[in-house]
Image (tube, rainbow, N blue to C red):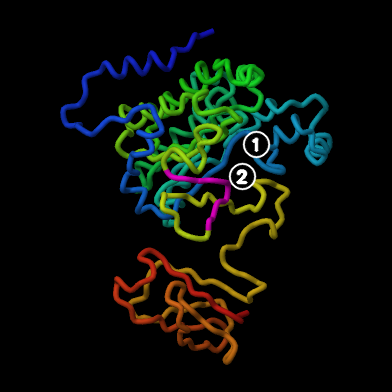
């Protein structure tokens, strides 16, 4: 068994390296007061839209949610127990899903092209969820990673190369600090986190490895397992990340670095899953939203009504039309909606005044957009029309 190096020793070795002559920025101390004073890199302020990808062994059963293992084995929820009884042989373990996670149709170049065409400015892939399975050949997750098991491929590397070679998107990674059933974490937990075997031998070495190998410019931490930040040595790791890592000048982080740190410490705030305060906050924040109302990843039991549309409000009789290019003619053609004279009203969000429109003979309509200067536009990247009483 390989004895991992202590993170403190690794940090000491890094500090001994001679600093770059061109680098004279102030260094950050391993304290929240110092780390929270770091300004977010400018690129993130301009990146208004990113894509979050949840993919792992939980995608094989693709039932309920990505918390499948926990709900089945720990909480023993009836629908998960029944699903396993109906579909898999007796004695089938969660680890048996590993070889079935083949990533057969995964094409990193295709993914990259889709992300680029979407208008997104960054992507974040789950490098490891709470199940502990890493999508790269982690030295610290022997035989429970995508290189040793399942696809036998370095998913993280393939996507990183495709994103950086084919797009102008920033590459980011999600990483779960804890693992539901890792014996070292469970032992630490039973000691009320006075023991620190798991972060010293697993989590911290793995995070250093991840950053040094793949240079993520978004590091999306999650899953503190109820442990405080000093158990994870979060401030020590972040000080290294901001001072000495290969992405020290461009990396952005979130706020999930230990119990009590969320919406309080770190880079940008996430506060809660699917967080949307409804107003601007003084601190940079992210609305990390799902397409599925109940799961962050694909699930086979999802019905069409379980997916968010972001395009209509049936109760208010509202339909939204989103466009990313302002027509030079000032007229926008909408091919689908059927408008009704005297009932249909069209407004540009952020502008407010009703717009003129013409109904086409069979279906669709032409909307006359307001004549605005560049500085008068309610947004500089994309716009939405609110249409009432259309079919």
Q: Is residue 337 left or right of residue 376?
A: right
Residue at x-position 47% and y-position 50%: 286
Query: Circle 2: is it few (<14), some (14-19), or many (20+) Cα within 10 Å?
Result: many
Query: Circle 1: is it few (<14), some (14-19), or many (20+) Cα within 10 Å?
Result: many
Q: Quadrant of the N terminus?
A: top right
Residue 276 - label: none
Q: Is residue 171 above or below residue 97?
A: below
**Residue pointed to by mark 2:** 297
Q: Measure the C-alpha gap from mark 2 to mark 1.
A: 9 Å
- Depth check: give the residue in front, 85 or 294: 294
**Residue pointed to by mark 1:** 58
Q: Is residue 275 magenta?
A: yes
Q: Position of residue 247 (x, y in %)?
A: 33, 34
Q: Is residue 23 magenta?
A: no
Extent of the magenta region: 268-277
Q: Is residue 149 left or right of residue 34?
A: right
- Find residue 383 and report its image quarter: bottom left
Residue at x-position 41% and y-position 37%: 160
Q: Secondary structure at mark 2?
A: loop
Q: Is residue 162 above or below residue 117?
A: above
Residue at x-position 60% and y-position 88%: 343
């Amino acid at each position: 068994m390989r004895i991992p190096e202590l993170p403190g020793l690794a940090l000491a070795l890094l500090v001994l390296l001679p600093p770059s002559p061109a680098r004279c920025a102030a260094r950050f101390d391993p304290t929240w007061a110092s780390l929270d004073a770091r300004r977010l890199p400018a690129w993130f302020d301009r990146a208004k839209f990113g894509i979050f990808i949840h993919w792992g062994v939980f995608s094989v059963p693709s039932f309920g949610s990505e918390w499948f293992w926990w709900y089945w084995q720990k909480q023993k929820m009836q629908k998960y127990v029944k699903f396993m009884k109906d579909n898999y042989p007796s004695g089938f373990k969660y680890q048996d899903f590993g070889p079935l996670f083949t990533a057969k149709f995964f094409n990193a170049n295709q993914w990259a092209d889709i992300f680029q065409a979407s208008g997104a400015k960054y992507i974040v892939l789950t490098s490891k969820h709470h199940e502990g399975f890493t999508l790269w050949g982690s030295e610290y997750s022997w035989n429970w990673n995508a290189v040793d098991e399942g696809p036998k491929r370095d998913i993280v590397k393939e996507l990183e190369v495709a994103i950086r070679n084919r797009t102008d998107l920033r590459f980011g990674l999600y990483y779960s600090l804890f693992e539901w059933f890792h014996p070292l974490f469970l032992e630490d937990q039973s000691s009320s986190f006075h023991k620190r075997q798991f972060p010293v031998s697993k989590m911290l070495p793995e995070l250093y490895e991840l950053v040094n190998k793949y240079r993520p410019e978004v590091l999306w931490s999650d899953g503190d397992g109820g442990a405080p930040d000093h158990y994870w040595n979060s401030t020590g790791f972040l000080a290294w990340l901001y001072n000495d890592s290969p992405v020290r000048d461009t990396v952005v982080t979130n706020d999930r670095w230990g119990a009590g740190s969320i919406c309080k410490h770190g880079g940008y705030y996430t506060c809660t899953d699917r967080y949307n305060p409804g107003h601007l906050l003084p601190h940079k924040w992210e609305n990390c939203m799902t397409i599925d109302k109940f799961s962050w990843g694909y699930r086979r039991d999802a019905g069409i009504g379980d997916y968010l549309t972001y395009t209509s409000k049936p109760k208010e009789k509202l339909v939204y039309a989103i466009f990313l290019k302002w027509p030079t003619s000032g007229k926008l053609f909408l091919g689908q909606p059927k408008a009704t004279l005297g009932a249909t009203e069209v407004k540009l969000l952020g502008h407010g005044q009703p717009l003129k429109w013409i109904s086409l003979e069979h279906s669709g309509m032409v909307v006359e957009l307001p004549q605005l200067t560049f500085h008068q536009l309610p947004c500089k990247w994309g716009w939405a029309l609110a249409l009432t009483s259309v079919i």
